[in-house]
Amino acid sequence: MTDPTVTHPTVTDPTVTDPTVAANEASPAAADEAPGKPVIPALQAEQAVQAVWCDYGGVLTSPLDGLFGQVAAAAGVPANELLAAIRRVAAPHGGTLIEPLELGLLTQREWGLRVTAELAPAWTPQLDLTRFGDHWYAGRTANTALFELLARVRARGLRVGMLTNSIREWEPHRQVLAPDVRPWPFEVTINSFEVALRKPDPAIFALAESTFGVPPAACLLIDDVAANCAAAQARGWQVIEHADPSRTLRLLEQWTAAGHGPGIPAEE
């Protein structure tokens, strides 16, 4: 559900390196980082949070773990073969996965036809890849509790936006999936396909900063992709790397209710 009273500029997540994921929406945490643990720059731990930017897929929705494999199985194509075809379609555009879709360079239909052609003659997908979003969103559920908490965060006077690597043809799926939370949490949505930028490109974080007029150290990102979190942190953002929904809720409540970036909770 979207709030008809606000405009929604849009942005997408940039580089996904997990070979099991065909979208920017998911990537495992780096081996040396604790998933869900807020990354707090040493000199900025007490900086007041003024703006919260939240990713969509895998954060505001159910986890994406194993989803690509499920879609590949339904298509009757080995996951490694489907991934290789997707990479070959992305390569001429300087990408490695679905960047052409997230940046709006190809329509979903064009992309699906090209992936299907790359699979031939060895493999004939049993799913229509020109409607890949239908299969990607099948069975997906919303993280309603996080939507609701973000609405409360906005009610406290903080700026709240969605910062997502997104695909134009997938927007109807997102609208259907969105819970009926009022007031709507997000003042602005930055979709990658609309702004031709995607995470982890620093330019998309700069765009988010200028959108709310908030300095980097006062911005908090919630994202499940380690590369996106690292890119935001490099700009001076505060970060919660999402892995466990209950943990993210607890950390977000602590960071925003306290009025400043807190230290890591003792139990963490």
Image (tube, rainbow, N blue to C red):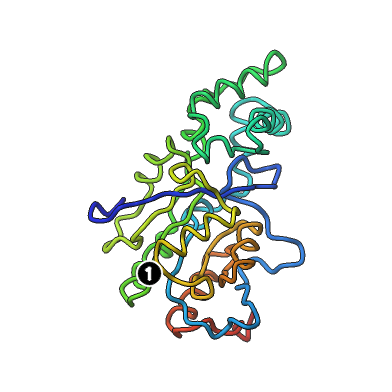
Q: Where is residue 146 in the image (x, y as percent from the top left)?
A: 43, 64
Label 1: which residue? Answer: 159
At 53% across and 60% down in the image, what residue appears? Answer: 205
On screen, residue 186 versus residue 108, left or right, reads left
> Which of these two is toward me, 49 or 258?
49
Residue 227 found in image quarter:
bottom right
Between 179 and 237, the one nearer to me in the picture = 237
Quarter of the image with the C terminus in it: bottom right
The picture quadrant where one finds residue 122 is: top right
Compared to residue 184, the image places residue 109 above or below, namely: above
Q: Position of residue 258 (x, y in %)?
A: 45, 85
Label 1 Cα neighbours within 10 Å, binned few <14 / some 14-19 / many ≥20: many
Above or below, comparing residue 124 to residue 16 in the picture:
above
Say above or below: 61 vs 262.
above
Question: Residue at point 33% right, 77% down?
Answer: 156
The residue furthest top is 121
Q: Residue at x 46, y 46 (%)?
A: 195
Rendered view: 46 above or below 246: below
Indicate left or right for 179 with 40 as reference: left
Instruction: Give, as a three-letter code, the residue at label 1.
Output: Arg
For mark 1, give the secondary structure.
strand
Between 246 and 57, the one lying in front of the other is: 57
